Image: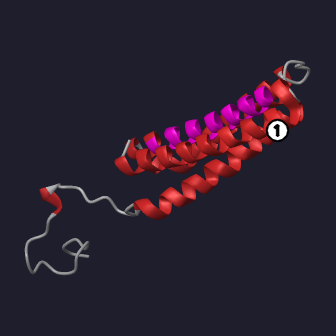
Amino acid sequence: MQPNDARIIRGAALFTAAAGALAILVGALVAGGAGALGVFLGVLVGFLFFASGQFGLARVGHRWPELFMGAALVIYITQVGVLLVLMILLRDATFLDGRAFGAGVLVAMFAWIIGQIRTNLKVKTPYVVPTADSSTDAPAGAGAPGREAGE
């Protein structure tokens, strides 16, 4: 993973954790212990959803950049499938407040996106990462850069 990716994930995670702590407090005040637990689990699910996707995409983008879009689609479909299974399992849960759970997921989603945007604006990720391969350097006066002889 590149250092910029790690900084983006860390920045979004810290912002989500702060917003989640505030949301848990509000959930406890509004709906008691079940509300606090629901918000906590919702924030945790939202956090894991976004963090796992971002981490997976960072690893794929570093190792196999040509597979980035396909990997993004596979990761997203897998995440949505896991969320579907989780929602089915928690459908009849009596130990948490369902509305608080949904509010926690929404808080995590908005906080992650805002934290990611904020960190992306500060990191200045390069579009092209230059390599130190000396075999691709053209001798001085060899013509236009990036063009092969005979083209």
User: Residue 75 versus residue 67: which sits nearer the camera?
Assistant: 75
Residue 121 falls left or right of residue 105 = left
Measuring from the top left, give residue 7's x and y in whole percent: 42, 48
> Can see residue 84?
no
Measuring from the top left, give residue 112's x and y in whole percent: 62, 48
Residue 43 falls left or right of residue 139 = right
User: Residue 24 falls in which quadrant of the image?
Assistant: top right
- Please say if 65 is above or below 97: below
Q: Which residue is mark 1?
A: 102
Main SS, magenta region, reads helix
Residue density around tag 1, few if under 14, some if 14–19, many if 20 or more, within 10 Å: some
Q: Amino acid at mark 1?
A: Gly
Residue 126 falls left or right of residue 19 = left
- Please say if 127 is above or below 1: below
Residue at 69% across, 42% down: 22
Residue at 35% across, 62% down: 128
Region rendered in magenta: 36-58
User: Residue 127 falls in which quadrant of the image?
Assistant: bottom left
